[in-house]
Amino acid sequence: MRLGVMIGAERGDSARKVTKLLDDIEWAEAAGMDTAWIPQVPTDFDALTAVALMATRTTRIELGTAVVPLQTQHPIALARQALSVHAAAGGRLALGVGPSHHWIIGDMLGLPYERPAAYTRDYLQVLNAALSGPGPVDVANDTFTVHNPLDLGPVAPLPVLVAALGPVMLGIAGELTDGTVLWMADERAIGDHIAPRITKAADNAGRPAPRIVAGIPVCLCAPTEVDAARERANRILGEAEVSPNYQRLLERGDAQDVGDLCAAGDEEAILARFRRFADAGVTDLSVRLLPIGDNRDELIASKRRTREMIAELAQQVR
């Protein structure tokens, strides 16, 4: 299992965000992280732009989006942007995409959120054709009719992963992409539901075994502070639970909320949790650092301790 870290969606003005992004990715590469995953938060930086920025300060680490909403741009436009960023990053982009949620696409953006799985399949047919260039992209399906010349091609293999939670989406992910990017999925949900379905779909399509990227909050703390860490996870990350998609996924596992997903405690407890995810079929773990404390200095110190511990564990989970 490869170990990565989530970077981005931090508070502060835009100039400070850029500095923070660059500082964090420099640490991640120096610490030996395999990957960095940049969430596409509706109110924050564009994830692919952030990848292009991070690529200027790194040479090795894979840079992934988690995830770009499909409905916000035409697949040709996304392919062009992704191929450009992939080239700028020296072939280190992993393109995570997904149909997002009704409260983002419909309520925030005022766009249709109908038949998201069917839309995702049609979208991926165009996107995959465009990413296999250079050459003409000629795809006609229920959603798109595309006849578009494209002079760009990938400078290296460009993995595409799709956020897939339910059975139909997992089938699409296994058939048409390189894997899935997850949030709100615990070990049982992955081992019993996600890994078997996406792996079977990939096998049926003659594709390699899929990547399964699982995002979880992590907090290094004393055993007596575990409850505080879980409470903080629920307070600052719990808004995702309003989604029916996440609620259905939680029902397939043992976790009741994002606090239950949090790997909190001492190094031994966190390593044991990491290994349970690996045993469930996770190929890539994406750590969302979760500091705790009563003031800014304590939060900074907590984050630093957790980062140092994650760097040490990276060698043990590979």
Image: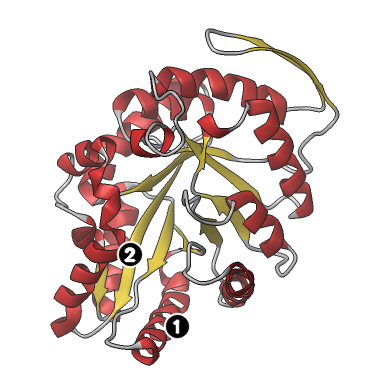
Q: Which mark is residue 217?
A: 2
Q: CA distance from mark 1 to mark 2?
A: 15 Å
Q: Which mark is residue 288?
A: none
Residue at image location 43% in from the left, 17% down from the top: 118
Q: Is residue 210 above or below residue 185?
A: above
**Position of residue 140 in the picture relative to residue 300 (left or right):** right
Q: Nearer the viewer, mark 1 or mark 2?
A: 2
Indicate the quadrant containing the N terminus: top left, top right, bottom left or bottom right.
bottom left
Coloring applied to the structure: secondary structure
Q: Amino acid at mark 1?
A: Glu
Spot occupied by residue 175 in the image (x, y as percentages of width and height): 48, 24
Residue at image location 13% in from the left, 84% down from the top: 224
Farthest residue to the bottom: give it. Answer: 297
The quadrant holding residue 27 is bottom right
Spot occupied by residue 147 in the image (x, y as percentages of width and height): 75, 12
**Could you tell me if residue 157 is visible in this image?**
no
Q: Which mark is residue 308?
A: 1
Residue at image location 25% in from the left, 51% down from the top: 186
Spot occupied by residue 100 in the image (x, y as percentages of width and height): 42, 37
Name the element at disc 1: helix
- Are the residues tagged 1 and 2 within 8 Å (C-beta)? no
